[in-house]
Image (spheres, rainbow, N blue to C red):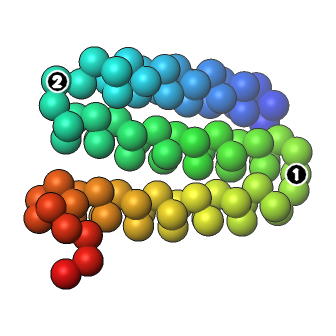
């Protein structure tokens, strides 16, 4: 049962990543592209967690936490740059 749920969730997350790539390529303006990139890293975190569940190892969960922290900081830096033109005041 868990194996079936993992395959279904893997397929849905890969489909979400494909839709994010389309939005990233065709986004009408920069905020839309930024939002697509932000959603892509959240989906990649989900893929890493699923891989950790499938292989039953803890290393992938630590990698997912690290990617989440880096993604948050990078999103904040890009938003600050778009709003103010400078990252550090």
The x, y position of residue 7, in whole percent, is 72, 25
Question: At x 49% / y 20%, what residue is drawn?
Answer: 18
Within-10-Å neighbours for mark 2: few <14, some 14–19, many 20+: few
Within-10-Å neighbours for mark 1: few <14, some 14–19, many 20+: few
Determine whether label 2 and label 1 are within 8 Å by CB.
no
Q: Nearer the viewer, residue 10 or 83?
A: 83
Q: Determine the secondary structure under disc 2.
A: loop
| Badge 2 or badge 1: first in the primary sequence | 2
Q: Which residue is mark 1?
A: 56
Q: Which residue is mark 2?
A: 28
The x, y position of residue 55, in whole percent, is 88, 45
The quarter of the rendered structure image containing the C terminus is bottom left
Q: Is residue 14 above or below residue 87?
A: above
Q: Nearer the viewer, mark 2 or mark 1?
A: 2
Question: At x 57% / y 42%, what residue is drawn?
Answer: 44
How many numbered discs sit on the rendered protein? 2
The x, y position of residue 58, in whole percent, is 82, 62
The quarter of the rendered structure image containing the N terminus is top right
Whether residue 30 sits left or right of residue 71 in the image: it is: left
Q: Determine the secondary structure under disc 1.
A: loop
Whether residue 69 sits left or right of residue 32 in the image: it is: right
Q: Nearer the viewer, residue 22 or 50?
A: 22
Task: Tell me the tag on residue 77.
Answer: none
Image-quadrant location for residue 37: top left
Question: At x 16% / y 24%, what residue is drawn?
Answer: 28
């Amino acid at each position: 049962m868990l194996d079936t749920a993992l395959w279904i969730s893997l397929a849905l997350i890969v489909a979400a990543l494909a839709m994010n790539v389309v939005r990233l390529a065709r986004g009408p303006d920069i905020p839309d592209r930024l939002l697509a990139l932000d959603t892509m890293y959240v989906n990649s975190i989900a893929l890493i967690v699923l891989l950790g569940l499938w292989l039953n190892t803890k290393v992938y969960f630590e990698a997912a936490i690290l990617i989440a922290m880096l993604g948050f900081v990078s999103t904040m830096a890009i938003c600050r740059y778009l709003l103010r033109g400078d990252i550090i005041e």
